[in-house]
């Protein structure tokens, strides 16, 4: 069974309501921040293993999603909220809030130069890796260094690749900064990470890889926004999805994605 | 069958044939320039930069760098159902179906170069609404010619004359320029010859035939955008379409676009 009519969507309103109050504490404009280890729902834990951790809706830090009853699917159907200021600022926020399914993450040796082989468990959602994005994410601010990270991975077709690239990393990345890797020719997704190779030491801090799959994008032009089912995309959310928030802000102040995400079953 | 009602839209968005893709592209534009993002690093991964292919090649969704999808069974059709993202500069994002391209091995030839292209196969072989573009693959030199083409128009009239608009000496790789058509023409069926009035001194260049699917304006840097099926005008994506992105830049700032697009069928 699947949703087939607008009445089907509205008939299930308000559906699940998931309240969000997240902040990274970062103040850079125009760069993505992850909000995994902050706010409401309870703060997620940073990864500890090079070979990483598979993540689910039961993982602390995930938005509290309830799976659809048997035979039904879950769809993101609405968002009401804002990219608001924290208590230290007064300006209205603007930018974009992304809702992702955070599939897997790990922690690498921050000072190691050269390849760190990674043997991760197979993904349990979006298992082919199609449209799965590979990102680096900072958990503790890095030192004054500008390495380039080359990622080895298995692509969406099962082919081994060794040329994923972070580009030149910015020096002294603040905690919760995150950014996407560029993939090899023609690749449209990542099935597994097999290696991380930094061209130089990050000197200090904590950083790792995140595999995530985009579920919704919520533009915030300033002030609160409401996105209906069509506008938010009505994307199907797999059972046990580990929903997380990634956002980009346009103001140089600490901002907070704040609002309510709705999901319907059908 | 076609998507004709809101219920059709909802059914297509929630349908199992939906295909979602991540967009990650990083590039440094020239101010005011239109940049073709097909060969820019990111996701989909950039294909290798071509070096020589005078008679060109047809493009489809299996071409490295495109956004692949599975064709529906008639009468079901494919639509661009959503387009979202954020860029750290403002500009206009255009979505095209890349139909054919060619490459001249150098940009110094000043005599007419004959081209014998394969017939277009999408959406038909007529060329109605098909635009001709000039493409820079490797930066050109200081020569400042007025490049021209000879083409067959949408009605089959041969030996029509077109002119590259606004070519600027020392164009950077990735820059692309529209080509004006002869009086009354509304499309290009085939390009049969290319002439540069003087040498461009150096570089690798080519021609592209592409057909527009949608365009959106990112009016402010770091401000997200999300357009749904209706916002986009319900654009049909033809079977095998080689979807590519163009960006009209506002500045020379290094730009990263992070977002996604969804293809739905109904």
Image: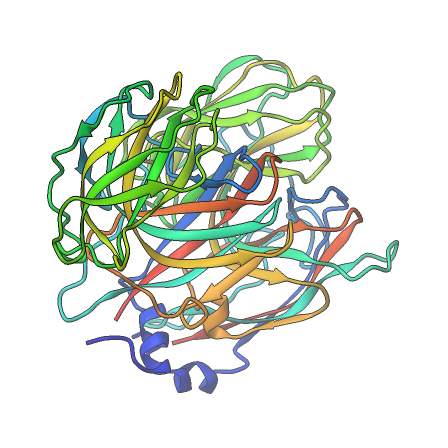
**Is residue B194 toward the left or the right of residue B137 in the image?**
left
Task: Name which residue lies at 60% across and 61% down.
Answer: A219
Q: Nearer the viewer, residue B57 or B200?
A: B200
Q: From the image, which quarter does the C terminus of chain A lie in?
A: bottom left
Image coordinates of residue B90 in percent, x first then y, are: 60, 49
- Tell me the colour scheme of the image: rainbow
Is residue A87 depicted above or below B110 in this figure?
A: below
Image coordinates of residue B31 in percent, x first then y, are: 58, 38
Q: From the image, which quarter does the N terminus of chain A lie in?
A: bottom left
Occupied quadrant, residue B107: top left
Is residue A29 depicted above or below A265 in this figure?
A: above
Task: Name which residue lies at 43% across and 48% down.
Answer: B22
Task: Name which residue lies at 30% across and 31% down.
Answer: B206
Occupied quadrant, residue B44: top left
Q: Nearer the viewer, residue A241 or B114?
A: B114
Image coordinates of residue A176 in percent, x first then y, are: 68, 40
Is residue A54 depicted above or below B145 in this figure?
A: below
Q: Nearer the viewer, residue B92 or A50?
A: B92
**Is residue A47 toward the left or the right of residue B8 in the image?**
right
């Amino acid at each position: 069974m699947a949703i087939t009519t607008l009445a089907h969507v509205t008939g299930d309103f308000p559906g699940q309501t998931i309240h969000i109050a997240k902040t990274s504490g970062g103040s850079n404009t125009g760069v993505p921040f992850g909000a995994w280890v902050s706010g409401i729902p309870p703060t997620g834990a940073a990864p500890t293993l090079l070979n990483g951790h598979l993540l689910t809706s039961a993982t602390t830090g995930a938005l509290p999603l309830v799976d659809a009853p048997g035979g039904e699917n879950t769809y993101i159907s609405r968002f009401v909220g804002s990219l608001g200021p924290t208590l230290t600022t007064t300006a209205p926020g603007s930018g974009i809030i992304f809702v992702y399914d955070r599939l897997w993450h790990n922690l690498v040796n921050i000072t190691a130069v050269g390849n760190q082989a990674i043997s991760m468990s197979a993904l349990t959602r979006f298992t082919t890796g199609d449209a799965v994005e590979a990102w680096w994410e900072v958990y503790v601010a890095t030192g004054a260094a500008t390495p380039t990270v080359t990622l080895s991975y298995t692509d969406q077709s099962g082919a081994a690749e060794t040329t994923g690239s972070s580009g030149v990393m910015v020096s002294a990345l603040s905690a919760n900064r995150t950014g996407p890797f560029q993939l090899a020719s023609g690749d449209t997704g990542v099935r597994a990470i097999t290696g991380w190779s930094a061209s130089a030491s990050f000197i200090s801090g904590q950083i790792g890889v995140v595999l995530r799959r985009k579920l919704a994008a919520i533009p915030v032009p300033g002030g609160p926004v409401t996105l209906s089912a069509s506008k938010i995309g009505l994307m199907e959310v797999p059972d046990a999805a580990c929903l997380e928030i990634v956002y980009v802000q346009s103001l140089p102040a600490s901002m907070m994605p704040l609002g309510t995400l709705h999901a319907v079953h059908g | 069958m076609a998507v004709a009602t809101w219920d059709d839209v909802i059914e297509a968005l929630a349908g199992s044939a939906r295909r979602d893709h991540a967009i990650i592209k990083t590039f440094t534009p020239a101010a005011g320039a239109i940049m073709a993002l097909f060969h820019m690093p990111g996701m989909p991964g950039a294909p290798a930069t071509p070096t020589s292919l005078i008679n060109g090649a047809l493009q489809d969704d299996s071409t490295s760098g495109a956004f692949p999808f599975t064709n529906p069974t008639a009468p079901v059709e494919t639509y661009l159902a959503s387009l979202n993202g954020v860029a750290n500069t403002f500009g206009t994002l255009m979505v095209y179906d890349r139909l054919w391209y060619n490459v001249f091995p150098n940009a110094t030839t000043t005599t007419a170069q004959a081209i014998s292209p394969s017939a277009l196969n999408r959406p038909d072989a007529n060329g109605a609404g098909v635009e001709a573009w000039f493409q820079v693959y490797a930066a050109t030199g200081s020569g400042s010619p007025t490049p021209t083409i000879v083409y067959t128009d949408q009605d089959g009239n041969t030996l029509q004359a077109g002119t590259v608009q606004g070519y600027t000496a020392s164009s950077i790789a990735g820059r692309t320029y529209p080509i004006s058509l002869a009086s009354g023409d509304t499309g290009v069926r085939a390009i049969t010859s290319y002439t540069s009035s003087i040498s461009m001194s150096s570089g690798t260049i080519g021609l592209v035939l592409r057909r527009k699917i949608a365009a959106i304006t990112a009016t402010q840097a770091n401000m997200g955008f999300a357009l749904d099926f209706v916002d986009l005008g319900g654009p049909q994506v033809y079977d095998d379409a080689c979807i590519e992105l163009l960006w009209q830049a506002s500045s020379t700032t290094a730009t990263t676009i992070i977002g996604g697009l969804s293809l739905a069928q109904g």
